[in-house]
Amino acid sequence: MRNRLMFTNIFVVICTILSLVIYPEIDLSYLRFRIGGIHYFFFV
């Protein structure tokens, strides 16, 4: 369970970095909303 949690966090960080690299003009509030949605999807 702990390994899955760590993998999920790493996956979110990688997605965030890729989003910033691909879409540098993206709104941070929108990015935070997407990350929150991903966390909600995985943990709830």
Image (cartoon, helix red, strand yellow):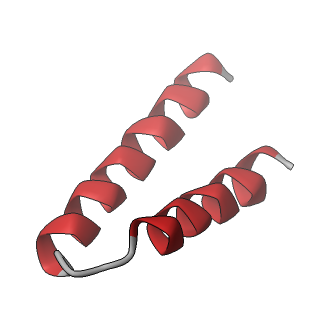
**Above or below for 19 versus 32:** below
Number of numbered discs: 0
Which residue does the image show at 68% across and 64% down from the upper left?
37
- Does residue 12 sit above or below 8 in this rendering? below
Percent position of residue 42, x then y: 71, 51
Q: Is 5 on the left-hand or right-hand side of 40?
A: left
37 horizontally vs 34: left or right: right
Left or right: residue 17 versus residue 43 is left
Q: In this view, does 23 lie above or below 14?
A: below
Q: In which quarter of the image is the N terminus?
A: top right
Residue 8 placement, left or right of 11: right
Q: In which quarter of the image is residue 4?
A: top right
Query: Residue 23: x percent and y percent?
Result: 21, 81
Residue at the outermost top position: 2
Please name the residue shown 21% across and 66% down the image: 20
Q: Is residue 13 above or below residue 25?
A: above
Question: Which quadrant of the view contains residue 41?
Answer: bottom right
Residue 13 percent across, percent down from the top left? 35, 46
Towards the viewer: 41 or 33 = 33
Q: Position of residue 28 (x, y in %)?
A: 40, 65
Q: Residue at x 48, y 37 (%)?
A: 9
Residue at 55% across, 58% down: 35
